[in-house]
């Protein structure tokens, strides 16, 4: 029943305590998982292996939260009171280890009960012990008749995906979200890709990136990181720059550019890039990332909805901020942090960004618009609105050959819509919507 292999060494109480604090950071303090790590002081004292276990446990719990809550509810005489949310989170973490990770049942029960004292709910040790022991005994039967894709997906997301894609596709999307994703890398020097593939033991994807298996931990410990030979980038995230075509020697302006994966891709392909982002801190991160790769780009800190270049632009890439529901494979916390009301709020900003980018476009110029969201209101609906407003702008349909032959990802109108279960046998993809637009000459 394991989702993936756990670290070789038996995890200790400190790693479980860290996982508890990460889960609390997401569910109770509404922080992203990465932000929760930054607010967990004990994280610094963990070994790399214990960090890997703690993060994996927290992420698995978030991925399987609906199933876990259903199993726990079946083992309780009555629902826990809201003030016992710490007990609830301990039960979730314990049940996740028993049902979905390769941790011995007796160790999980014992360590979870012992942890209750450290997090000040020791008075409920008997409850924890009884519920977790029952899950250990009856776990297979308790989850057998559940509907994992539906249970693990918040209702507003599920209903929206069913409306947009149909129930069969919504189910395939949700099933992919329950799996730990592989690690994708993009090599700086395309001529060295085969060499790095062999050295890392990776597979080459049809989109041109390299893929390492699920469970690959801290990429900074892999060969080539310190040398700046590659960067981490989901295969789908590497598609938008491809739609600008041959960029060698051309000037490309990337809007909302940070943290810089697509910037690196464009520079590595020979483009002269101006990266624009409103956040100076995120631009510093972009520059740091490029420096590690021995790449360089000009930067401008500006609000894209207000900024205008001194002259019209031939090549624009706009990877707009979004709800990021297309990245749930890698960021299961997003499903617990975002709400339905976030979609129209983001769409309003995205429309402003798209209109601003269109105003920058020179006659004959190309604009690629992308979002890592599954919600049509953040993608195709905005592009259709822009095309209705601007008779001088048209779609430029994408040929599947431009994106590694991913025929299933090209829509009837010629846009790109990757879904998490695309390349499912290879480990899936992040969900991106991408449109290529051209202003009439």
Image (cartoon, grey):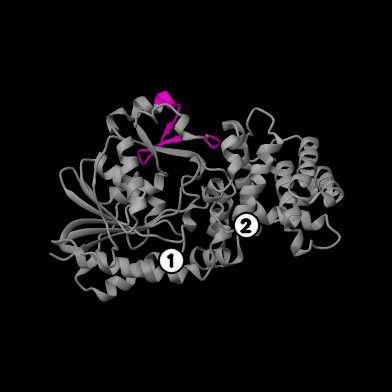
Measuring 14% from the left and 61% from the top, which residue is drawn there? Answer: 310
Measuring from the top left, give residue 395's x and y in whole percent.
Answer: 26, 63
Position of 427 compared to 277: left or right? right
Q: Residue at x 50, y 39 (%)?
A: 182
Element under disc 1 = helix
Q: In this view, does 346 lie above or below 177?
A: below
Res 75 visible: yes
Asked whether, in this view, residue 131 is left or right of residue 369, the answer is: right
Does 360 sit above or below residue 192? below
Determine contact: label 2, label 1, CB under 8 Å.
no
The residue that mark 1 highlights is 376
Query: Residue 82: x percent and y percent?
Result: 74, 64
Give the class, few, some or many, for how many residues have Cα within 10 Å of label 1's Cα (few <14, many ≥20): some
**Quadrant placement of the N terminus:** top right
Q: Residue furthest bottom?
A: 389
Q: Which of 309 and 175 is in front in this view?
A: 309
| Residue 185 image point, x, y percent | 40, 37
Q: Is residue 199 magenta?
A: yes
Left or right placement of residue 234 versus residue 298 in this view: right
In the depicted view, which residue is nearer to us: 45 or 246? 45
Distance from Cα at disc 2 to Cα at disc 1: 27 Å
Q: Does residue 140 appear in this view?
A: no
Q: What element carries label 2?
A: helix
- Bounds of the magenta span? 198-216
277 up-or-down from 197: above or below: below
Crowd tier of the residue under label 2, counting other residues whose Cα lies within 10 Å: few below 14, some 14–19, many 20 or above = some
> Where is mark 2, residue-wise?
27
Residue at x 43%, y 32% (from the top left corner): 203
Q: Earlier in the sequence, mark 2 or mark 1?
A: 2
- Residue drawn at the location 32% of the way across and 53% of the way down: 257
Q: Is residue 160 magenta?
A: no
């Amino acid at each position: 029943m394991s989702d993936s292999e756990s670290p070789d060494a038996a995890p200790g109480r400190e790693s479980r305590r860290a996982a508890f604090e990460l889960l609390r950071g997401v569910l109770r303090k509404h922080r992203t998982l990465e932000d929760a790590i930054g607010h967990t002081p004990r994280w610094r004292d963990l070994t790399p292996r214990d960090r890997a276990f703690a993060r994996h446990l927290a992420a698995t719990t978030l991925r399987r939260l609906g199933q876990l809550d259903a199993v726990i509810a079946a083992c309780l005489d009555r629902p826990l009171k809201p003030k016992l949310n710490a007990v609830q989170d301990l039960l979730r973490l314990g049940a996740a280890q028993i049902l979905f990770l390769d941790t011995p049942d007796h160790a999980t029960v014992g360590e979870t009960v012992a942890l209750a004292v450290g997090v000040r709910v020791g008075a409920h040790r008997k409850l924890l012990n009884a519920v977790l022991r029952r899950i250990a005994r009856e776990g297979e039967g308790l989850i057998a008749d559940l509907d994992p894709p539906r249970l693990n997906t918040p209702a507003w997301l599920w209903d929206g995906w069913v409306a947009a894609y149909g129930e069969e596709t919504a189910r395939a999307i949700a099933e992919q979200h329950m799996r730990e994703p592989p690690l994708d890398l993009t090599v700086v020097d395309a001529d060295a890709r085969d060499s790095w593939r062999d050295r890392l033991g990776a597979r080459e994807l049809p989109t041109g990136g390299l893929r390492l298996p699920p469970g690959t931990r801290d990429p900074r410990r892999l060969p080539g990181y310190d040398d700046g030979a590659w960067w981490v980038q989901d295969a789908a995230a590497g598609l938008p720059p491809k739609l600008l075509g041959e960029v060698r020697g051309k000037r490309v302006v990337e809007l909302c550019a940070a943290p810089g994966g697509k910037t690196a891709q464009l520079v590595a392909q020979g483009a002269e890039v101006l990266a624009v982002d409103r956040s100076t801190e995120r631009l510093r991160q972009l520059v740091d990332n490029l420096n590690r790769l021995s790449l360089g780009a000009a930067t401008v800190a500006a609000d894209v909805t207000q900024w205008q270049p001194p002259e019209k632009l031939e090549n624009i890439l706009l990877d707009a901020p979004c709800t990021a529901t297309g990245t749930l494979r890698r960021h299961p916390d997003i499903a617990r942090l975002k709400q339905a009301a976030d979609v129209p709020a983001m769409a309003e900003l995205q429309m402003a960004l798209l209109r601003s980018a269109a105003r920058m476009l020179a006659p004959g110029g190309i604009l690629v618009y992308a979002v890592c969201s599954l919600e049509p209101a953040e993608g195709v609906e905005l592009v259709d609105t822009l095309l209705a407003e601007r008779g001088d702008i048209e779609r430029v349909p994408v040929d599947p050959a431009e994106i590694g032959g991913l025929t299933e990802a090209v829509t009837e109108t010629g846009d790109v819509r990757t879904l998490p279960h695309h390349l499912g046998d290879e480990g899936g993809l992040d969900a991106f919507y991408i449109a290529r637009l051209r202003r009439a000459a």
